[in-house]
Image: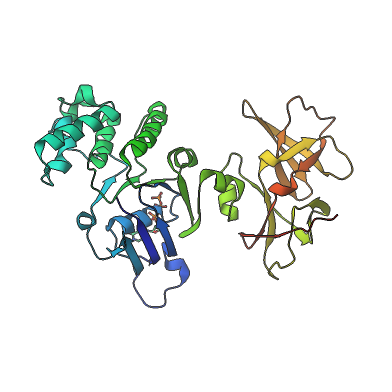
Amino acid sequence: MARIDLVDLAHSYLVGDDLPPAAYALKPVSMTWRQGGAYALLGPSGCGKTTLLNLISGIVTPSRGKILFDGTDVTRLSTRERNIAQVFQFPVIYDTMTVRENLAFPLKNRGVPKPEIDRRVAEIADLLDLTPNLGRKATRLTADAKQKISLGRGLVRSDVAAILFDEPLTVIDPHLKWELRSKLKALHRALDLTMIYVTHDQTEALTFADTVVVMHDGRVVQSGTPEELFEKPAHTFVGYFIGSPGMNIVPAQIRGREALIDGHAITLARGYDNLPSGAKIEIGVRPEFVHLTAKAPGFLSGRIERIDDLGRIRFAWVRVGGVRFAARVPDGFSADGDEVGLMIEPSRVHVYADSEIVEGSALEQVA
Ligand SMILES: Nc1ncnc2c1ncn2[C@@H]1O[C@H](COP(=O)(O)OP(=O)(O)OP(=O)(O)O)[C@@H](O)[C@H]1O
């Protein structure tokens, strides 16, 4: 297990001096992945997740910057020299070997003594419910079982610096995905390994990881706990990408502790006197903190376009002038016509300048 430091790390698949920022699949990033942490690397297709993962594993050598494992520079070392285990989207196993032989292979390859191999294989097989299949040839098993073997081969060595998973549940049947995700989380707790899990699926990321690293357009835009990403998205992309529905992000004019939206004022919990001039200013508030209410003076008001019933919770889509809000529909609420008010919790409203969060200043208490 290792602590991994990325130091001003960046990568472009193009070669040349003075490449423009857009040429970088990974834009410069410096961050630390702590020893024993469970990380998810989350973002849409093409945002640079696999590039970052391949830089950490050593499949790709960076155009710039350094990678340190426990303080040692490994930037130019191979995957094997870095002592990394990897699990890919599709099973990587030996069909002609038994499940036991497949699981034992990474240990045998490294000269681990037989009693230790037997002990470790039994432990991993038990954790992944593979024990009944240990004597069977891998070729006879389902795609799900084969991917479990791949996971097992990744997890079987206790001496690895980190285990990297690249969308490992893609081929897994939907009803088994949930089970395997929980299992991976339990394995992380039991084995105390540094794990990095790449996915474009927020549910997978939020259930597996202690820390979710969100990528957008080649940049790491936020790294935080699932709660931090929900409560305080550092970038509008995080607000929009995480949550269902995502955060309301609407253009606003800020005046002191008020935001003007389409001519209506809403109260803010903090003051914003130093917003950069010329920046695109938006406010962001999660639908969970916008409550539908009867139209009344003092509330933002608009017209309901649609209500989505998600079972335990309902969200309404409300048109307010030129913008649209998703808002929580309180139990028992029935609108008198389409016109409704929106009650927004001031402490849940964030202000963004050119998509980056702006920390407001605490307001002085008025005696
Ligand atoms: N070998 C390569 N050569 C040139 N460009 C590449 C190469 N691999 C990736 N890219 C480009 O780098 C960018 C980031 O790709 P990357 O595969 O890292 O994203 P991703 O988030 O993992 O996407 P996906 O989920 O689709 O795999 C994309 O624009 C992609 O086209």
Ligand 1: image quarter? bottom left
In depth, the one of 214 and 360 nearer the eye is 360
Residue extending farthest front:
367
In depth, the one of 229 and 241 nearer the eye is 229
- Position in image of residue 134 (x %, y %): 18, 26
Judge whether 117 appears above or below 217 on screen: above
Residue ID at (56%, 48%)? 228
- Position in image of residue 55 (x %, y %): 32, 59
Judge from the rendering whether residue 258 lies leftward or rightward of residue 85; answer left or right: right
Q: Quadrant of residue 230?
A: top right
- Position in image of residue 73 (x %, y %): 28, 65
Judge from the rendering whether residue 48 lies leftward or rightward of residue 249; answer left or right: left
Residue ID at (56%, 51%)? 238
Residue ID at (27%, 58%)? 58
Would residue 170 be visible to someone looking at this image? Answer: no
Q: Quadrant of residue 52?
A: bottom left
Residue extending farthest bottom:
17
Judge whether 37 appears above or below 71 on screen: above
Q: How has the structure been colored for display?
A: rainbow
Quadrant (top left, top right, bottom left, bottom right) of the C terminus: bottom right
Judge from the rendering whether residue 200 lies leftward or rightward of residue 90; answer left or right: right
Residue extending farthest top:
132
In depth, the one of 333 and 122 nearer the eye is 122
In depth, the one of 93 and 207 nearer the eye is 207
- Position in image of residue 366 (x %, y %): 84, 56
| Number of numbered discs visible in the structure rendering | 0
